[in-house]
Amino acid sequence: MAIEVFENIKQEFNNKIEKVDSKEELDELRQDFFGRDSGKFSEAMSAISDISNEKKAEYGKAGNKTKEYLQSKIKQKRKELEEERLKNLTKEESIDITQPA
């Protein structure tokens, strides 16, 4: 497994996160990439044991950078979804102060 695997993971992740419209979908996406048993990123990192000693450091660095990238995108998307939820909530529950009590 070469370091290109992390670029492929990033590309796939970016394609999928664009389609996420809810917190539940975001949690599923996070599980799909970081799940302990079958997460794509987790599997790629577990392959470090198959890498030669000379390339382990480079592979590990690429993995860590990818992990930071994915986590920051998840955090950003979570913030966007929360802002959208609050915006919609404000629209739905606005009080008309011109109405008599």
Image (cartoon, grey):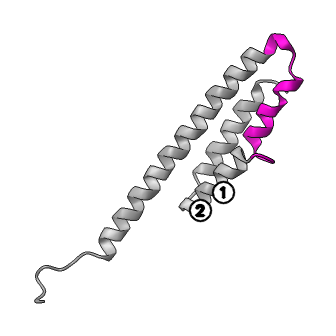
Q: Is residue 82 left or right of residue 25?
A: left
Q: Are marks 1 and 2 in contact (CB under 8 Å)?
A: yes
Label 1 sits on a secondary structure element that is helix
Q: Which residue is mark 1?
A: 28
The reply to whether residue 22 is visible in this rendering is yes
| Residue type, label 2 | Glu
Q: Which residue is mark 2?
A: 24
Determine the CA span between mark 1 and mark 2.
6 Å
Q: Which residues lie in the magenta part?
A: 36-55
Q: Main secondary structure of the magenta part?
A: helix
The reply to whether residue 21 is visible in this rendering is no
Residue 98 vertical placement versus 41 (above, below):
below
Magenta segment: does it hold 49? yes
Residue 57 vertical placement versus 37 (above, below):
above
Q: Position of residue 13 (x, y in %)?
A: 66, 44
**Residue at figure coordinates x 10%, y 89% from the top left:** 100
Q: Residue furthest bottom?
A: 101
Q: Residues within 10 Å of mark 2 (few under 14, many from 20)?
A: few
